[in-house]
Image (cartoon, rainbow, N blue to C red):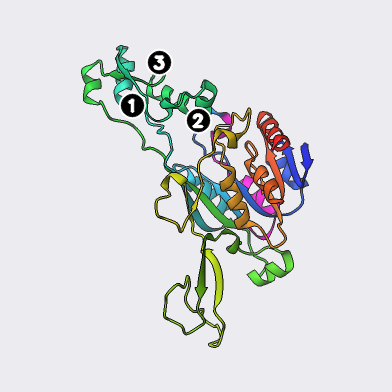
Amino acid sequence: MQIYNKDNIQVYCGDLLDVLPTIEKVDCVVTDPPYGLSFMGKAWDHSVPGPEYWQAIKESCKPGAMMLAFGGTRTQHRLTCAIEDAGWEIRDCLMWLYGSGFPKSMNISKAIDKAAGAKREVIGKRTDGRYAYGFSEQAKRALGDIAHAEAQGFSGEMGLITAPATDAAKQWNGWGTALKPAYEPIVLAMNALDGTYVNNAIRHGVAGLNIDACRIGDDVRVNPPAGNKSGGNSYNMSVVGMPANAEPTVATGRFPANLLLNDEMLGEQSRFFYCAKASKKDRGEGNDHATVKPQALMTYLLRLLSTPTGGVILDPFAGSGTTALAAKKLGLACICVEKDPHNCDIIVSRLEHD
């Protein structure tokens, strides 16, 4: 059922297998599907969408359409295989790196004491990291802190530092079950071309990636003509088949890479795109979705896949609608599909109040 249609943004509430056969052919796909991690016990995250979903998405796309799909570090192989089994060509895997991930590791020492029914002595309270900022309970749940605390066997107030109670717990003090997450993979795939890139571009208006729209920085970089091996400030050397008397070409900014960084990792690496994780303001009022992507990141990805005429973007796992907001800001047409009615309400609210 269509629940929103304004400013070239359409939102459908329903299963994508039911909705997609009714929509127009789209030019690209940008989406953040379930990772199959059972995040915070959410039913929607119990499995990675299988090939039948990616087949339906493929059938909704023009030939040569590009797709970017976020995945989980432990389940990206299932995502990639499902996409490939549906007939997509896997082109690359982008990596979004960040420094503010929260560990989802069980404290083995605490788990041992809990299993033994032993009470641990409170010896302090954490004041570092997120515990220093006084998040509300709603914000903590949205960020995953509660799930983390439950996995560790916490009881009572969060952030307490406790001492091992049993000998076994003392022996295993400091052991955990997982590393701190610091990146998310983004699978880049392409629908089958209608012949060549040239034919696809002319016939369907879809071909490749919008490189110049996503160049990094504002320094001017010169591509020398064929035969010039002098190097210097060039970002690329001669091209096979280019006439020997060809003029050099000029571009502003570095060629975009398949590595995207969080601004906490800025340092001196000025050759990559930077984006912070979603802030409270970025999420919007009342947005309690657990895995909100930052608008700046989605805006960058939409620019990368946009066609010369803009094109129509599809997000078949719309979540809280960040893809739609990014498309709206860029003036692009976007079709969003979301199965959860509560999330659909969030999407409409964000679009109405943006």
Which of marks 3 and 1 precedes in the sequence? 1
Q: Is residue 53 magenta?
A: yes
Density class for disc 1 (Cα within 10 Å; few <14, some 14-19, many ≥20) is many
Tell me: 353 left or right of 263: right
Front residue of 303 and 186: 303
Q: Is residue 108 left or right of residue 39?
A: left
Amino acid on which disc 1 is placed: Asn
Residue occupied by mark 2: 143
Q: Are marks 1 and 2 in contact (CB under 8 Å)?
A: no
- Tell me which segment is drawn in magenta: 43-65
Residue shown at the point (62%, 37%) measured from the top left: 319
Is disc 1 placed on a helix, strand or loop?
A: loop
- Please name the residue shown 69% across and 43% down the image: 336
Q: Could you say which disc has been placed on residue 155 in the image?
A: 3
Query: CB atoms at circles 3 and 2 under 8 Å apart?
Result: no
> What x and y, as percent, mark residue 208?
61, 64
For the view shown, which residue lies furthest in the bottom direction?
245
Q: Earlier in the sequence, mark 1 or mark 2?
A: 1
Amino acid type assigned to the residue bearing label 2 in the image = Leu
Could you say which quadrant of the image residue 341 lies in?
top right
Q: Residue at x 24, y 16 (%)?
A: 166
Disc 1 and disc 3: Cα gap in Å?
Answer: 13 Å
Q: Amino acid at mark 3?
A: Ser
Q: Dot 2 surroundings within 10 Å: few (below 14), some, or many (20 or more)?
A: many
Q: Quadrant of the N terminus?
A: top right
Mark 3 vs mark 2, CA separation in Å: 19 Å
**Element carrying mark 3:** loop
Which mark, by number, is residue 107? 1
Estimate the x, y position of residue 298 in percent, counting from the top left. Answer: 59, 47
